[in-house]
Structure formats: structure tokens, C-alpha cells
Amino acid sequence: MTEPISVVVTGAAGQIAYSLLYQIAAGTVFGPQQSINLRLLDIPPMMKVLDGVVMELEDLALPLLREVLPTAEPAKAFENVAAAFLVGAMPRKEGMERKDLLAANVEIFKVQGEALDKYARKDVRVLVVGNPANTNALICSHYAPSIPKENFTAMTRLDQNRAQAALAARLNVQVDKVKNVIIWGNHSSTQYPDAAHATVELSSGVKTVPSEINDNEWLINTFVETIQKRGAAVIAARKMSSAMSAAKAAGDHMRDWWFGTKPGEWVSMGVVSDGSYGIPKDIVFSFPVTIKDKRYEIVQNLPINNVAKSKLDITSKELEEERAEANNVLKK
Ligand code: NAI
């Protein structure tokens, strides 16, 4: 077994963390050989709840889990962390748009960026889950100038998993037979779930998803809208936002970042745009990436048709607007 690494989860008393902590402590994310020191950050009124979470973590009796530190102090939470799951934020409630959340969350991610800059390892891998995740990741990285920008990512893996599951259901195959569906852009209703490059493994061989589904109207309209609105549909049914599936997606995202993607496969992550596919630089945009040695590369040269191009424009505009609004909040 290797030396423990420190991993911070913010919003640790919340509902996503409740599912995520088990995955981290059980070895699903960083592997069965990697022992973990967990740092749990939440706000002062939640410390009693957090004590209960700590008790449950103890009661899991998991050998990989070493120290567990519940705290409301970013300086302690971020000390020497190798990986950070920034989940803590105000969750979206029914009828609330992501933009309403922006102002409430900008300040949190500024403070946490500064704490990462001061206390975390310089090679820390940061995954922002708390919404608006893309813009929060951008702000966080801005306030942590000593950590490479590439180390800040936003989660669109839940959208990818939803898209993969929806295609598998439509094709009537097991979910892991569908590969390389892409989520472009913002983790919001403007995201573009794109099945154009996805494949499906059938008994007759590997086929492209569009040719197997053979229903352009469904792919361009029904599929895209279903995925774009899936988060809202879960809220309408549960009266709370997705938690179990969000936690699983956060684990998937970090595990693939840590261990790499499989040959021929890519995953979607919100990363700082380098201008690929004509997307403006300096917004956190979800691209398909391949990962090796804990470094991702944006998949290049995928053909983008006019429909896709217009969808990419919509979602990148929204991200530019969010960036402008965030800057306004920070100036006040
Ligand atoms: P929750 O309300 O159950 O938990 C949030 C926790 O964050 C609370 O315990 C709260 O006290 C804590 N918190 C608030 N401010 C904090 C701060 N400054 N520092 C540390 N902790 C703080 O919410 P839930 O369901 O766990 O969701 C968390 C976030 O994840 C929300 O913003 C939600 O919109 C987002 N989300 C993102 C998804 C994605 O795909 N990117 C999917 C689902 C949810």
C-alpha cells in the first residue's frame, strides 16, 4: 500500500458528498492500493451534521481510510491536498436558473481558489461540481495562479453518463456498449450532447450510433433536449437535485483523470479552452478529452457540421456571459 494522499471534499455534509465519500474511501476512485486522508469542508452551521458523517465513515471500517478531518476552515481543509472535489455550493431549487446561482457562488470559489493556491499541492487535481460548475472552475483557477490552469476542471460527466444511458436504452444494449458520446460546452441547459461520433458494440461488430439509430430527428431534437433537461426532470420528481448519479459521475471523472482513458475512448470534461474548435479561449468548456499520465488532451479534428457548430456557439456565448457576470460580482 502506498503513502496516503490527502483528498478534500467540500460541501461534505451535503447530499452529493454523502454518496461520493464512500466511493473515495472504498478505493473506487484512486484505486485499491491508495490510502486516503480525507478532509471534509463545510460551513460552521453544518459541523454537527458533519460529525455524523465522520461517525459513518468510521463505521464503514474501510482499511484505505486513514485520517478524517471535518472542518469549516479552508486553510486546514486544503492543506497538502492532491485532489479536490469542490462540491459545496448552493444547490439549484425547482424553477431556479443557473444564472441566479452565479452571484451566490462566485464568492465561495474565490475563497477556495485562494486557499488552494496557498495550501494545496501544486499538482493538485481540482474537480468543480458545485454549480455553475464551469464558471466556478474558471474563478477558482483565477485565484490560484501558482497552480497550472489545466489542473482545474468542471464536471460534465453526469451529462455524459446520462447521454450514454439514453442511447443504450434506445439501442436496447448494455450501457457500456455505447462509447464516445460527447458533451460540449456548459453544464447547463445549453450544453450540446452529441452522438454523432458515438459508437455501439453489437454482436455484428462496432457500428456508429447515428447509423444504428437511423432517426436524425430523434437524435437532433428528442435526445438533445432529454439530456439538456434531465437535471430539471430529476429535481421536479425528487424535489432535490441529482445526488447519487452526480457522486458517481464525480468519481468517474477523477478516476479517469488519475488513471487515464482506455485506448480509442474519450470522456467529456470542462477544461480551460485553448481555442480548439473555434471556442473562445479562457472559458471552461466541456470538450472530449483523452487522458494519459494524469494529463488530458482535447480530441482534435472531429468533423463539426453546421447544426453542431450553431449549438457550440450558443453554449460558448452563455459561458462568456457567465464570465462577464462573475467578473461584475467580483468587482463589486
Ligand atoms: P447540498 O445542499 O445537499 O450540499 C451542499 C453543501 O455545501 C451543504 O452542506 C452546504 O452547507 C455546503 N456549503 C455551502 N457553502 C459552502 C462553502 N462555502 N464551503 C463549504 N461547503 C459549503 O447540495 P448537493 O446536492 O450536494 O449539490 C452540491 C452542488 O452540486 C450544487 O451546486 C449542485 O447544483 C451541484 N450539482 C452539480 C452537478 C454537475 O453535474 N456538475 C450535478 C448535480 C449537482
Image (tube, rainbow, N blue to C red):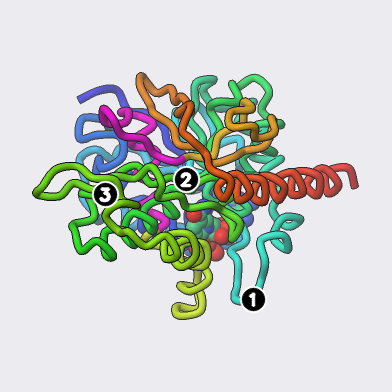
- Give residue 141's position: percent from left, percent from top: 65, 32
Which residues lie in the magenta part? 246-268
Q: Quadrant of residue 260?
A: top left
Tell me: 13 left or right of 260. right
Q: Nearer the viewer, mark 3 or mark 2?
A: 3
The residue identified by callout 3 is: 178
- Give residue 292's position: percent from left, percent from top: 35, 22
Q: Nearer the viewer, mark 1 or mark 2?
A: 1
Mark 3 and mark 1 lie on one chain; the one further toward the N terminus is 1
Q: Amino acid at mark 1?
A: Gly
| Residue that appears at 24% across and 38% down | 64
The residue identified by callout 2 is: 9
Asked which secondary structure carries label 1, the reply is loop
Q: Nearer the viewer, mark 3 or mark 1?
A: 3
Relative vertical location of residue 231 with respect to residue 307 in this rendering, above or below: below
Asked which secondary structure carries label 3, the reply is strand
The residue identified by callout 1 is: 95
Q: Amino acid at mark 2?
A: Val
